[in-house]
Image (tube, helix red, strand yellow):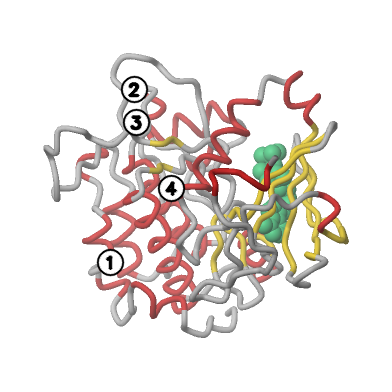
């Protein structure tokens, strides 16, 4: 009966959009439409495999989630959040795109962009540190993707170099939206235009800790609240880490890391580039309202010379240095 879904005409030919990416079809894809290949990685509830569409020969990464395990560990909510957010964020080259989802008796399948370059963290570990040019390029691509998701009403809440994947061109593909938050659209039309850094703040209900200790924002620790600006705190931590080779707040355990964060206890290594230091000091600000907003980050001298928007994604990635 899927053939008659929503009364739309059925096409068996694969349509291609402006960017040469396949347009999701009405006829549902299934396990049998793919050739599964090597394992790209394993998560706590999932295995990610390289796969090829038998019809188009296009390569994907397919995340396979074990239904029984997800139900047993009460992670159904997170799987749904991941699917719902990715379905909202399909038009940006800097975010891993979800093409199809399907299931069989045992598993759920998410068909995603293949990020063959692996995690940004892996590249950073190999290099030790990035130079200013590489940090500017990767920082700009990450920020451009954050701006897009925030405009679409999504807060990531777990940005870190492990969740920044790289494609075959060594361009950024942000992933792991399982702990993201979708903001409800304001219906009364107020606050249009003006950006509210506290967008997404939940006042009543205390939330449980989401994210990774080293990148967690002080407002999440003190008020149990994350907002759009919380992603910019994490962004500041990432810029610092790319240049210094280690995150700004790191201790022997989570508790001590949290203490450093709420106390804004961090220092810059000798020789840290002053312009980058200035940017980071405007991002690692305890009060989320006072954190530099995206529009001002883009015009900060650290990002001088960067072409924002579409052009940023047509650029050749600098050789890692
Ligand atoms: P956890 O669920 O424990 O937090 P995770 O979020 O890393 O782990 P997955 O999303 O299943 O779990 O990813 C597992 C691994 O597969 C990741 O470490 C990542 O390196 C790799 N991976 C994930 N998505 C892709 C992709 N689209 N392309 C290439 N590799 C990927």
Mark in front: 1 vs 3: 1
* Residue beneath the point at 28% across and 36% down: 185
- Assess disc 1: are there few (<14), some (14-19) or many (≥20) residues with their C-alpha within 10 Å of its C-alpha: some
**Alpha carbon of mark 2 to alpha carbon of mark 3: how far?**
5 Å
Give the residue pinned by disc 2: 223
Q: Is the Cβ of the residue at disc 4 closer than 8 Å to that at disc 3?
A: no
Mark in front: 4 vs 1: 1
State left or right for residue 288 relative to residue 259. Answer: left
Mark 3 Cβ and ligand 1 under 8 Å apart: no
Dot 4: element: helix
* Residue beneath the point at 35% across and 43% down: 153
Q: Is the Cβ of the residue at disc 2 closer than 8 Å to that at disc 3?
A: yes
- Where does residue 71 sit, x and y in percent of width and height? 73, 21
- Assess disc 3: are there few (<14), some (14-19) or many (≥20) residues with their C-alpha within 10 Å of its C-alpha: many
As drawn, 75 above or below 279: above
- Where does residue 249 sit, x and y in percent of width and height? 48, 43
State left or right for residue 309 relative to residue 16. Answer: left
Give the residue pinned by disc 1: 298
**Alpha carbon of mark 1 to alpha carbon of mark 2: how far?**
28 Å
> Which numbered disc, 2 or 4, marks the residue that appears first in the sequence?
2
Give the residue pinned by disc 3: 219
> Which numbered disc, 1 or 2, marks the residue that appears first in the sequence?
2
Mark 4 Cβ and ligand 1 under 8 Å apart: no
Give the residue pinned by disc 4: 234
- Assess disc 2: are there few (<14), some (14-19) or many (≥20) residues with their C-alpha within 10 Å of its C-alpha: few
């Amino acid at each position: 009966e899927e053939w008659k879904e929503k009364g739309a005409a059925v096409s068996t030919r694969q349509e291609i959009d402006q960017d040469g990416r396949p347009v999701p079809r009405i006829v549902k894809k299934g396990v049998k439409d793919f050739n599964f290949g090597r394992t790209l990685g394993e998560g706590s509830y999932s295995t990610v495999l390289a796969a090829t569409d038998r019809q188009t020969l296009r390569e994907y990464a397919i995340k396979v989630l074990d239904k029984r395990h997800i139900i047993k560990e009460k992670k159904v909510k997170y799987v749904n959040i991941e699917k719902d957010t990715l379905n909202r964020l399909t038009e940006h080259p800097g975010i891993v795109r979800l093409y199809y989802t399907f299931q069989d008796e045992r598993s759920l399948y998410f068909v995603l962009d293949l990020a063959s370059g692996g995690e940004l963290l892996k590249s950073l570990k190999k290099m030790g540190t990035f130079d200013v040019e590489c940090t500017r390029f990767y920082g700009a691509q990450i920020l451009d993707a954050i701006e897009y998701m925030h405009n679409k009403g999504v807060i990531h809440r777990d940005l870190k170099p492990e969740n920044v994947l790289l494609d075959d061109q060594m361009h950024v593909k942000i992933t792991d939206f399982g702990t993201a938050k979708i903001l409800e659209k304001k219906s009364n039309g107020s606050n249009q235009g003006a950006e509210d850094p506290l967008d997404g703040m939940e006042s009543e209900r205390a939330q449980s800790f989401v994210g990774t200790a080293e990148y967690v924002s002080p407002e999440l620790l003190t008020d149990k609240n994350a907002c759009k600006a919380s992603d910019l705190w994490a962004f500041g931590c990432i810029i610092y880490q790319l240049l210094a080779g280690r995150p700004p707040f790191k201790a022997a355990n989570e508790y001590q890391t949290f203490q450093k964060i709420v106390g804004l206890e961090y220092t810059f290594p000798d020789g840290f580039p002053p312009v980058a230091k200035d940017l980071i000091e405007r991002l690692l600000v305890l009060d989320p309202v006072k954190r530099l907003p995206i529009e001002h980050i883009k015009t900060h001298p650290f990002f001088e010379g960067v072409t924002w928007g579409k052009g940023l994604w047509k650029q050749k990635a600098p050789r890692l240095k």
